[in-house]
Amino acid sequence: MYTPRHFELADDRVRALLASAETAQLVTAHETGPVATLLPLTYRPDADGYGSLIFHVTRVNPVWRDTGLGESLAILSGPDGYIHPDWYPSNAASPGVPTWNYVTVHAYGRLVVHDDAAWLATAVDEMSERFGYDAGRVAPDARQRMLRAIVGLELPITRIEAKAKLNQNRTPEDIAGAIAGLREVGDDALADAMTRISVPHAQERAALLAGIRGRRLGNVGP
């Protein structure tokens, strides 16, 4: 994934997205080509790295039977949305074009298949609890039948590519206009992400540029 430095997502925000994402596109490599599967997930952090993403699929899904062709990729999405150019104050004097803002994390690793009943039971309970369901309500015999019908998938994350394309290359005024426009159309999630990430970046960038201009004009010291 192409990621200019000013669009890089900080490590703490990467971990936050790993913990909050409810689904991922799991991309696996096969002799016939790549396969993408949308799956709900749970995240298991660890102390040494990024931890693991936990999924399960039905046993009849062939995706789990052929996992040896290199790394797999899980694509996790944060907020995203359309940015209207008229939201930028600068657009009045110099009309530009719209863009699409987004946050995404690409997590890579070698997929591990789990066909152990105890592992599967724990994974299902974790996912049920995460989404607010008491799996204990299911009768034991029915639960065992269901567990036999699925296979667990674990992606131990070995590397991360993360990007937040949120207008960091624009002025603070244009970013403020985009945030206001997003809130007007009800996209608070993307507006909040821009407030957390883009505003501090743009303010720091504006201060840096002002300092450079000031030194060139002899208005500020080195």
Image: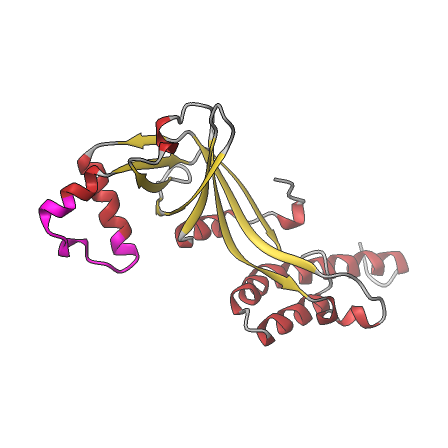
At which x and y percent is residue 161?
A: 55, 40
Per the picture, the main secondary structure of the magenta-coloured stretch is helix
At which x and y percent is residue 21?
A: 42, 53
Instruction: Give yes or no for residue 101 being in the magenta stretch.
Output: no
In the picture, measured across the screen, residue 204 lies left or right of residue 42, that is: right
Q: Is 174 drawn above or below residue 38 in the view shown?
A: below
Q: Residue shown at 66%/70% (left/top)?
A: 176
At which x and y percent is residue 197?
A: 58, 59
At which x and y percent is residue 185?
A: 59, 73
Q: Residue shown at 24%/32% (left/top)?
A: 115
Q: Quadrant of the C terminus?
A: bottom right
Q: Residue shown at 62%/57% (left/top)?
A: 101
Q: According to the image, what is the colour scheme of the structure? A: secondary structure
User: Closest to the observer: 26 or 46?
Assistant: 26
Q: Residue shown at 85%/66% (left/top)?
A: 94
Q: Quadrant of the N terminus?
A: top right
Magenta range is 128-143
Q: Residue furthest bottom?
A: 184
Q: Is 137 drawn above or below residue 120 in the view shown?
A: below
Q: Is 188 drawn above or below residue 1 in the view shown?
A: below
User: Closest to the observer: 30 or 8?
Assistant: 30
User: Would you identify the image quadrant in which residue 48 lies?
Assistant: top left
User: Closest to the observer: 204 or 131?
Assistant: 131
User: Would you identify the image quadrant in which residue 191 lies?
Assistant: bottom right
Q: Is residue 166 visible?
A: no
Instruction: Give yes or no for residue 140 being in the magenta stretch.
Output: yes
Q: Is residue 139 visible?
A: yes
